[in-house]
Amino acid sequence: MTTTAPKQRSETADKILDLAETLIQTRGYSAFSYQDISDGLGIRKASIHYHFPSKTDLGIAVVDRYVARFGDALAMLAADETRPSMAVMELYLEPYAGFADTADRVCLCGALAGEILALPAEMRARVEGFFRTHQEWLTKILKRGTARGEFRLVAPAGKQARFIFSALQGALLVKRATGDATQLRDIITVMKMQLTTGS
Amino acid sequence: MTTTAPKQRSETADKILDLAETLIQTRGYSAFSYQDISDGLGIRKASIHYHFPSKTDLGIAVVDRYVARFGDALAMLAADETRPSMAVMELYLEPYAGFADTADRVCLCGALAGEILALPAEMRARVEGFFRTHQEWLTKILKRGTARGEFRLVAPAGKQARFIFSALQGALLVKRATGDATQLRDIITVMKMQLTTGS
DNA sequence: GTCTATACAAAGATAGAC
DNA sequence: GTCTATCTTTGTATAGAC
Protein backbone atom coordinates (compact mmCIF):
# COMPACT_ATOMS: atom_id res chain seq x y z
CA MET A 1 0.00 0.00 0.00
CA THR A 2 0.78 3.67 -0.11
CA THR A 3 2.63 3.99 -3.39
CA THR A 4 1.22 7.46 -3.77
CA ALA A 5 0.13 8.23 -7.29
CA PRO A 6 2.69 10.84 -8.37
CA LYS A 7 0.88 14.04 -9.20
CA GLN A 8 1.10 14.70 -12.89
CA ARG A 9 3.16 17.81 -13.36
CA SER A 10 4.73 19.61 -16.25
CA GLU A 11 8.41 19.31 -16.95
CA THR A 12 8.99 22.90 -15.95
CA ALA A 13 7.21 22.39 -12.67
CA ASP A 14 9.46 19.44 -11.96
CA LYS A 15 12.57 21.45 -12.71
CA ILE A 16 11.34 24.18 -10.40
CA LEU A 17 10.75 21.64 -7.65
CA ASP A 18 14.18 20.11 -8.14
CA LEU A 19 15.97 23.40 -7.90
CA ALA A 20 13.85 24.65 -5.03
CA GLU A 21 14.64 21.49 -3.10
CA THR A 22 18.35 21.98 -3.58
CA LEU A 23 18.13 25.65 -2.67
CA ILE A 24 16.20 24.93 0.52
CA GLN A 25 18.65 22.20 1.45
CA THR A 26 21.63 24.47 1.01
CA ARG A 27 20.42 27.99 1.86
CA GLY A 28 17.22 27.39 3.76
CA TYR A 29 13.63 28.33 3.01
CA SER A 30 13.78 31.96 4.11
CA ALA A 31 16.92 32.68 2.14
CA PHE A 32 15.90 31.34 -1.24
CA SER A 33 13.80 33.37 -3.65
CA TYR A 34 11.90 33.11 -6.90
CA GLN A 35 14.75 35.13 -8.37
CA ASP A 36 17.17 32.30 -7.54
CA ILE A 37 14.95 29.86 -9.42
CA SER A 38 14.60 32.31 -12.28
CA ASP A 39 18.36 32.69 -12.56
CA GLY A 40 18.98 28.97 -12.29
CA LEU A 41 16.45 27.83 -14.87
CA GLY A 42 16.50 30.81 -17.22
CA ILE A 43 12.81 31.57 -16.89
CA ARG A 44 11.04 34.65 -15.56
CA LYS A 45 9.74 34.96 -12.02
CA ALA A 46 6.18 35.33 -13.35
CA SER A 47 6.44 31.90 -14.97
CA ILE A 48 7.27 30.35 -11.64
CA HIS A 49 4.20 31.97 -10.14
CA TYR A 50 2.15 30.34 -12.89
CA HIS A 51 3.19 26.90 -11.62
CA PHE A 52 3.30 27.75 -7.93
CA PRO A 53 1.23 30.84 -7.19
CA SER A 54 2.88 31.57 -3.86
CA LYS A 55 6.16 30.69 -2.21
CA THR A 56 4.18 28.77 0.37
CA ASP A 57 2.64 26.62 -2.38
CA LEU A 58 6.08 25.86 -3.71
CA GLY A 59 7.47 25.10 -0.29
CA ILE A 60 4.64 22.69 0.49
CA ALA A 61 5.03 20.95 -2.87
CA VAL A 62 8.75 20.48 -2.28
CA VAL A 63 8.24 19.00 1.17
CA ASP A 64 5.35 16.80 0.04
CA ARG A 65 7.39 15.30 -2.75
CA TYR A 66 10.34 14.73 -0.45
CA VAL A 67 8.22 13.14 2.26
CA ALA A 68 6.43 10.91 -0.27
CA ARG A 69 9.75 9.65 -1.64
CA PHE A 70 10.80 8.49 1.81
CA GLY A 71 7.32 7.27 2.70
CA ASP A 72 7.18 4.81 -0.17
CA ALA A 73 10.58 3.42 0.71
CA LEU A 74 9.64 3.05 4.37
CA ALA A 75 6.43 1.19 3.56
CA MET A 76 8.22 -1.21 1.25
CA LEU A 77 10.93 -1.90 3.78
CA ALA A 78 8.43 -2.54 6.55
CA ALA A 79 6.55 -5.03 4.39
CA ASP A 80 9.61 -7.20 3.86
CA GLU A 81 9.43 -9.93 6.49
CA THR A 82 12.34 -12.06 5.32
CA ARG A 83 15.30 -9.71 5.26
CA PRO A 84 17.58 -9.54 8.33
CA SER A 85 16.92 -6.48 10.46
CA MET A 86 20.39 -5.06 10.01
CA ALA A 87 19.96 -5.33 6.25
CA VAL A 88 16.69 -3.42 6.49
CA MET A 89 18.46 -0.83 8.59
CA GLU A 90 21.16 -0.49 5.97
CA LEU A 91 18.57 0.11 3.27
CA TYR A 92 17.04 2.79 5.42
CA LEU A 93 20.40 4.44 5.82
CA GLU A 94 21.17 4.53 2.11
CA PRO A 95 19.74 7.99 1.49
CA TYR A 96 21.74 9.33 4.41
CA ALA A 97 24.88 7.73 3.08
CA GLY A 98 24.06 9.40 -0.21
CA PHE A 99 24.04 12.78 1.47
CA ALA A 100 27.45 11.96 2.84
CA ASP A 101 28.82 11.89 -0.69
CA THR A 102 27.98 15.52 -1.32
CA ALA A 103 29.57 18.49 0.37
CA ASP A 104 26.48 20.50 1.04
CA ARG A 105 23.40 18.31 0.99
CA VAL A 106 21.45 17.56 4.11
CA CYS A 107 18.00 16.18 4.80
CA LEU A 108 15.43 18.69 3.61
CA CYS A 109 13.50 18.46 6.84
CA GLY A 110 16.65 18.71 8.91
CA ALA A 111 17.50 21.97 7.18
CA LEU A 112 13.96 23.28 7.64
CA ALA A 113 13.98 22.40 11.33
CA GLY A 114 16.45 25.20 12.03
CA GLU A 115 13.96 27.83 10.93
CA ILE A 116 10.77 26.01 11.80
CA LEU A 117 9.03 29.00 13.37
CA ALA A 118 9.60 31.04 10.23
CA LEU A 119 7.85 28.48 8.06
CA PRO A 120 4.22 28.59 6.91
CA ALA A 121 2.12 26.43 9.23
CA GLU A 122 1.45 23.89 6.49
CA MET A 123 5.16 23.27 6.03
CA ARG A 124 5.73 23.10 9.76
CA ALA A 125 3.13 20.35 10.12
CA ARG A 126 4.77 18.31 7.38
CA VAL A 127 8.24 18.54 8.85
CA GLU A 128 6.83 17.45 12.17
CA GLY A 129 5.07 14.53 10.50
CA PHE A 130 8.28 13.50 8.77
CA PHE A 131 10.14 13.38 12.07
CA ARG A 132 7.38 11.42 13.80
CA THR A 133 7.02 8.93 10.97
CA HIS A 134 10.72 8.19 10.81
CA GLN A 135 11.07 7.76 14.53
CA GLU A 136 8.08 5.44 14.61
CA TRP A 137 9.48 3.44 11.74
CA LEU A 138 12.84 3.13 13.46
CA THR A 139 11.11 2.02 16.65
CA LYS A 140 9.41 -0.78 14.73
CA ILE A 141 12.57 -2.06 13.12
CA LEU A 142 14.41 -1.96 16.46
CA LYS A 143 11.64 -3.98 18.08
CA ARG A 144 11.66 -6.42 15.21
CA GLY A 145 15.41 -6.86 15.43
CA THR A 146 15.23 -7.38 19.16
CA ALA A 147 12.42 -9.94 18.90
CA ARG A 148 14.48 -11.87 16.39
CA GLY A 149 17.59 -11.74 18.50
CA GLU A 150 19.42 -9.65 15.90
CA PHE A 151 19.75 -6.46 17.94
CA ARG A 152 20.56 -5.91 21.57
CA LEU A 153 19.29 -2.61 22.92
CA VAL A 154 20.44 -0.79 26.04
CA ALA A 155 17.19 1.19 26.26
CA PRO A 156 13.53 0.87 25.20
CA ALA A 157 13.18 0.76 21.41
CA GLY A 158 11.36 4.09 21.26
CA LYS A 159 14.09 5.94 23.09
CA GLN A 160 16.87 4.30 21.16
CA ALA A 161 15.05 5.09 17.90
CA ARG A 162 14.99 8.74 18.87
CA PHE A 163 18.66 8.58 19.66
CA ILE A 164 19.51 7.12 16.27
CA PHE A 165 17.29 9.49 14.34
CA SER A 166 18.63 12.53 16.16
CA ALA A 167 22.18 11.41 15.54
CA LEU A 168 21.56 11.02 11.81
CA GLN A 169 19.94 14.42 11.45
CA GLY A 170 22.56 16.11 13.59
CA ALA A 171 25.38 14.39 11.76
CA LEU A 172 24.17 15.74 8.43
CA LEU A 173 24.21 19.30 9.71
CA VAL A 174 27.60 18.94 11.37
CA LYS A 175 28.99 17.25 8.28
CA ARG A 176 28.07 20.17 6.11
CA ALA A 177 29.11 22.85 8.56
CA THR A 178 32.55 21.34 9.09
CA GLY A 179 32.89 20.04 5.55
CA ASP A 180 33.93 16.67 6.92
CA ALA A 181 32.12 13.91 5.04
CA THR A 182 33.35 11.23 7.43
CA GLN A 183 31.00 12.55 10.11
CA LEU A 184 28.06 10.59 8.77
CA ARG A 185 29.95 7.38 8.15
CA ASP A 186 31.38 7.51 11.65
CA ILE A 187 27.92 7.93 13.12
CA ILE A 188 26.58 4.98 11.17
CA THR A 189 29.52 2.83 12.25
CA VAL A 190 29.02 3.61 15.91
CA MET A 191 25.28 3.12 15.66
CA LYS A 192 25.67 -0.35 14.21
CA MET A 193 28.21 -1.28 16.85
CA GLN A 194 25.81 -0.22 19.54
CA LEU A 195 22.99 -2.29 18.10
CA THR A 196 25.00 -5.49 17.99
CA THR A 197 27.26 -5.05 21.03
CA GLY A 198 24.50 -5.61 23.58
CA SER A 199 24.81 -5.34 27.32
CA MET B 1 43.21 30.42 30.83
CA THR B 2 40.66 31.65 28.33
CA THR B 3 38.15 33.46 30.50
CA THR B 4 37.67 35.95 27.73
CA ALA B 5 37.35 39.50 28.96
CA PRO B 6 33.72 40.33 28.17
CA LYS B 7 33.63 43.21 25.76
CA GLN B 8 32.23 46.27 27.44
CA ARG B 9 28.95 47.05 25.80
CA SER B 10 26.07 49.41 26.49
CA GLU B 11 22.88 48.14 28.02
CA THR B 12 21.00 48.69 24.80
CA ALA B 13 23.57 46.71 22.86
CA ASP B 14 23.14 43.85 25.30
CA LYS B 15 19.38 43.91 24.92
CA ILE B 16 19.77 43.87 21.15
CA LEU B 17 22.10 40.89 21.38
CA ASP B 18 19.72 39.04 23.68
CA LEU B 19 16.75 39.50 21.42
CA ALA B 20 18.73 38.78 18.26
CA GLU B 21 19.96 35.55 19.78
CA THR B 22 16.42 34.44 20.56
CA LEU B 23 15.19 35.44 17.13
CA ILE B 24 17.97 33.54 15.38
CA GLN B 25 17.32 30.50 17.53
CA THR B 26 13.63 30.49 16.73
CA ARG B 27 13.28 31.93 13.23
CA GLY B 28 16.76 31.65 11.83
CA TYR B 29 19.25 34.27 10.68
CA SER B 30 17.76 34.94 7.23
CA ALA B 31 14.25 35.37 8.58
CA PHE B 32 14.90 37.86 11.35
CA SER B 33 15.18 41.58 10.67
CA TYR B 34 16.11 44.85 12.31
CA GLN B 35 12.39 45.57 12.29
CA ASP B 36 11.81 42.59 14.59
CA ILE B 37 14.35 43.99 17.03
CA SER B 38 12.85 47.45 16.71
CA ASP B 39 9.38 46.11 17.50
CA GLY B 40 10.59 43.98 20.37
CA LEU B 41 12.65 46.64 22.14
CA GLY B 42 10.69 49.73 21.22
CA ILE B 43 13.60 51.50 19.58
CA ARG B 44 14.05 52.64 16.00
CA LYS B 45 15.88 50.64 13.38
CA ALA B 46 18.43 53.41 12.99
CA SER B 47 19.36 53.06 16.66
CA ILE B 48 20.18 49.42 16.12
CA HIS B 49 22.45 50.37 13.24
CA TYR B 50 24.26 52.71 15.61
CA HIS B 51 25.24 49.73 17.80
CA PHE B 52 25.66 47.19 15.01
CA PRO B 53 26.22 48.91 11.67
CA SER B 54 25.31 45.89 9.57
CA LYS B 55 23.30 42.74 10.08
CA THR B 56 26.51 40.79 9.59
CA ASP B 57 28.11 42.68 12.47
CA LEU B 58 25.16 41.83 14.67
CA GLY B 59 25.17 38.19 13.62
CA ILE B 60 28.87 37.83 14.35
CA ALA B 61 28.49 39.48 17.75
CA VAL B 62 25.65 37.14 18.68
CA VAL B 63 27.60 34.05 17.70
CA ASP B 64 30.80 35.27 19.36
CA ARG B 65 29.04 35.84 22.65
CA TYR B 66 27.33 32.48 22.46
CA VAL B 67 30.52 30.63 21.62
CA ALA B 68 32.43 32.42 24.37
CA ARG B 69 29.84 31.44 26.96
CA PHE B 70 30.30 27.78 26.13
CA GLY B 71 34.05 28.11 25.69
CA ASP B 72 34.56 29.34 29.23
CA ALA B 73 32.50 26.48 30.64
CA LEU B 74 34.38 23.92 28.57
CA ALA B 75 37.74 25.18 29.70
CA MET B 76 36.72 25.11 33.35
CA LEU B 77 35.35 21.61 33.07
CA ALA B 78 38.45 20.30 31.36
CA ALA B 79 40.65 21.73 34.07
CA ASP B 80 38.89 19.81 36.82
CA GLU B 81 40.89 16.63 37.36
CA THR B 82 39.09 15.31 40.42
CA ARG B 83 35.46 15.07 39.39
CA PRO B 84 34.19 11.72 38.02
CA SER B 85 33.90 11.71 34.25
CA MET B 86 30.16 11.13 34.25
CA ALA B 87 29.72 14.14 36.52
CA VAL B 88 31.75 16.24 34.11
CA MET B 89 29.57 14.96 31.29
CA GLU B 90 26.46 15.93 33.20
CA LEU B 91 27.76 19.45 33.68
CA TYR B 92 28.40 19.66 29.97
CA LEU B 93 24.86 18.55 29.29
CA GLU B 94 23.25 21.12 31.56
CA PRO B 95 22.78 23.76 28.88
CA TYR B 96 21.17 21.18 26.62
CA ALA B 97 18.86 20.08 29.40
CA GLY B 98 18.00 23.74 29.83
CA PHE B 99 16.92 23.94 26.21
CA ALA B 100 14.68 20.96 26.87
CA ASP B 101 12.67 23.04 29.31
CA THR B 102 11.61 25.51 26.65
CA ALA B 103 9.34 24.76 23.73
CA ASP B 104 11.25 26.52 21.04
CA ARG B 105 14.86 27.01 22.02
CA VAL B 106 17.65 25.14 20.31
CA CYS B 107 21.41 25.56 20.15
CA LEU B 108 22.18 28.75 18.27
CA CYS B 109 24.74 27.02 16.11
CA GLY B 110 22.44 24.09 15.46
CA ALA B 111 19.81 26.46 14.15
CA LEU B 112 22.36 28.28 12.01
CA ALA B 113 23.65 25.02 10.56
CA GLY B 114 20.44 24.59 8.58
CA GLU B 115 21.14 27.72 6.57
CA ILE B 116 24.91 27.70 6.72
CA LEU B 117 25.43 28.55 3.06
CA ALA B 118 23.26 31.63 3.40
CA LEU B 119 25.39 33.01 6.23
CA PRO B 120 28.15 35.60 5.94
CA ALA B 121 31.51 33.81 5.77
CA GLU B 122 32.54 35.12 9.19
CA MET B 123 29.54 33.52 10.83
CA ARG B 124 30.04 30.30 8.93
CA ALA B 125 33.58 29.98 10.23
CA ARG B 126 32.43 30.46 13.80
CA VAL B 127 29.70 27.86 13.60
CA GLU B 128 32.21 25.43 12.17
CA GLY B 129 34.63 26.24 14.98
CA PHE B 130 31.92 25.69 17.58
CA PHE B 131 31.18 22.24 16.21
CA ARG B 132 34.84 21.28 16.06
CA THR B 133 35.60 22.53 19.54
CA HIS B 134 32.71 20.68 21.12
CA GLN B 135 33.51 17.43 19.37
CA GLU B 136 37.15 17.70 20.40
CA TRP B 137 36.16 18.41 23.96
CA LEU B 138 33.80 15.43 24.03
CA THR B 139 36.56 13.24 22.62
CA LYS B 140 38.81 14.26 25.49
CA ILE B 141 36.29 13.53 28.19
CA LEU B 142 35.48 10.17 26.65
CA LYS B 143 39.16 9.28 26.60
CA ARG B 144 39.54 10.40 30.16
CA GLY B 145 36.56 8.35 31.28
CA THR B 146 37.87 5.30 29.49
CA ALA B 147 41.36 5.64 30.94
CA ARG B 148 39.86 5.84 34.41
CA GLY B 149 37.62 2.85 33.83
CA GLU B 150 34.50 4.98 34.17
CA PHE B 151 33.28 4.63 30.59
CA ARG B 152 33.20 1.68 28.27
CA LEU B 153 33.13 2.66 24.60
CA VAL B 154 32.08 0.53 21.67
CA ALA B 155 34.03 2.67 19.19
CA PRO B 156 37.08 4.98 19.17
CA ALA B 157 36.51 8.04 21.36
CA GLY B 158 36.55 10.43 18.40
CA LYS B 159 33.80 8.59 16.58
CA GLN B 160 31.69 8.15 19.66
CA ALA B 161 32.10 11.83 20.47
CA ARG B 162 30.77 12.72 17.06
CA PHE B 163 27.84 10.44 17.63
CA ILE B 164 26.97 12.02 20.94
CA PHE B 165 27.34 15.57 19.67
CA SER B 166 25.28 14.87 16.57
CA ALA B 167 22.58 13.24 18.65
CA LEU B 168 22.37 16.25 20.98
CA GLN B 169 22.14 18.74 18.14
CA GLY B 170 19.65 16.62 16.23
CA ALA B 171 17.55 16.03 19.31
CA LEU B 172 17.18 19.75 19.90
CA LEU B 173 15.85 20.30 16.41
CA VAL B 174 13.50 17.32 16.55
CA LYS B 175 12.31 18.35 19.98
CA ARG B 176 11.26 21.75 18.77
CA ALA B 177 9.76 20.53 15.51
CA THR B 178 7.63 17.91 17.21
CA GLY B 179 7.04 19.93 20.35
CA ASP B 180 8.01 16.92 22.42
CA ALA B 181 10.33 17.99 25.22
CA THR B 182 11.08 14.40 26.22
CA GLN B 183 13.16 13.97 23.07
CA LEU B 184 16.23 15.47 24.67
CA ARG B 185 15.90 13.69 27.98
CA ASP B 186 15.46 10.38 26.20
CA ILE B 187 18.59 10.98 24.17
CA ILE B 188 20.60 11.81 27.25
CA THR B 189 19.31 8.72 29.04
CA VAL B 190 20.27 6.41 26.20
CA MET B 191 23.64 8.07 25.79
CA LYS B 192 24.54 7.53 29.43
CA MET B 193 23.40 3.91 29.28
CA GLN B 194 25.66 3.34 26.34
CA LEU B 195 28.66 4.88 28.04
CA THR B 196 28.35 2.66 31.09
CA THR B 197 26.95 -0.52 29.54
CA GLY B 198 30.21 -1.51 27.86
CA SER B 199 30.69 -4.44 25.51
C1' DG C 1 22.60 57.57 21.65
C1' DT C 2 18.19 57.99 19.66
C1' DC C 3 15.30 60.04 16.52
C1' DT C 4 13.00 61.34 11.60
C1' DA C 5 13.48 60.94 7.04
C1' DT C 6 14.88 58.81 3.15
C1' DA C 7 17.45 56.03 -0.25
C1' DC C 8 17.85 51.76 -2.59
C1' DA C 9 17.42 47.06 -3.60
C1' DA C 10 15.06 42.77 -3.27
C1' DA C 11 11.16 40.03 -2.42
C1' DG C 12 6.54 38.20 -3.33
C1' DA C 13 2.96 38.81 -6.27
C1' DT C 14 -0.51 40.28 -10.21
C1' DA C 15 -2.26 42.03 -14.91
C1' DG C 16 -2.42 41.38 -19.30
C1' DA C 17 -0.07 40.75 -24.02
C1' DC C 18 1.61 37.03 -26.84
C1' DG D 1 2.90 28.62 -20.53
C1' DT D 2 5.90 32.32 -20.84
C1' DC D 3 6.72 36.94 -21.31
C1' DT D 4 6.99 42.34 -20.00
C1' DA D 5 5.59 45.56 -16.94
C1' DT D 6 4.26 47.03 -12.70
C1' DC D 7 2.85 47.16 -7.78
C1' DT D 8 3.53 46.73 -2.85
C1' DT D 9 5.96 45.63 1.04
C1' DT D 10 9.90 44.67 3.46
C1' DG D 11 14.79 44.77 4.41
C1' DT D 12 19.24 46.89 4.91
C1' DA D 13 21.41 50.96 5.35
C1' DT D 14 22.72 56.15 5.60
C1' DA D 15 22.28 61.34 6.58
C1' DG D 16 21.60 64.54 9.64
C1' DA D 17 18.73 66.86 13.46
C1' DC D 18 18.20 66.71 18.43
Image (cartoon, coloured by chain):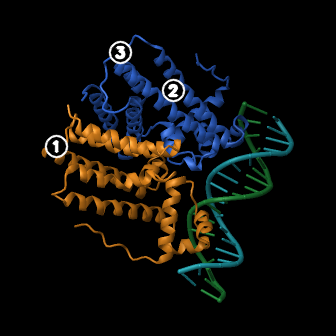
Chain colours: A orange, B blue, C green, D cyan
The chain under label 1 reads A
The chain under label 3 reads B
The x, y position of residue C7, in whole percent, is 80, 55
Circle 2 Cα neighbour tier, 10 Å, few/some/many (<14 / 14–19 / ≥20) = some
Viewer can see residue A159 = no
Marker disc for residue B70: 2
The chain under label 2 reads B
- State the separation of the CA atoms marked 1 and 2: 39 Å
Taking the spot 23% from the left edge, 42% from the top edge, the residue there is A158
Q: Which amino acid does label 2 sit on?
A: Phe
The x, y position of residue A100, in whole percent, is 44, 50
The picture quadrant where one finds residue A197 is top left
Q: If the image is split into quadrants, where does the N terminus of chain B sit?
A: top right
Taking the spot 33% from the left edge, 59% from the top edge, the residue there is A70
The residue pinned by badge 1 equals A146
The residue pinned by badge 3 equals B84
The total number of labels drawn is: 3
Viewer can see residue A56 = yes
Taking the spot 52% from the left edge, 37% from the top edge, the residue there is B22
The picture quadrant where one finds residue B36 is top right
The residue closer to the viewer here, A12 or B152, is: B152
**Callout 3 secondary element:** loop
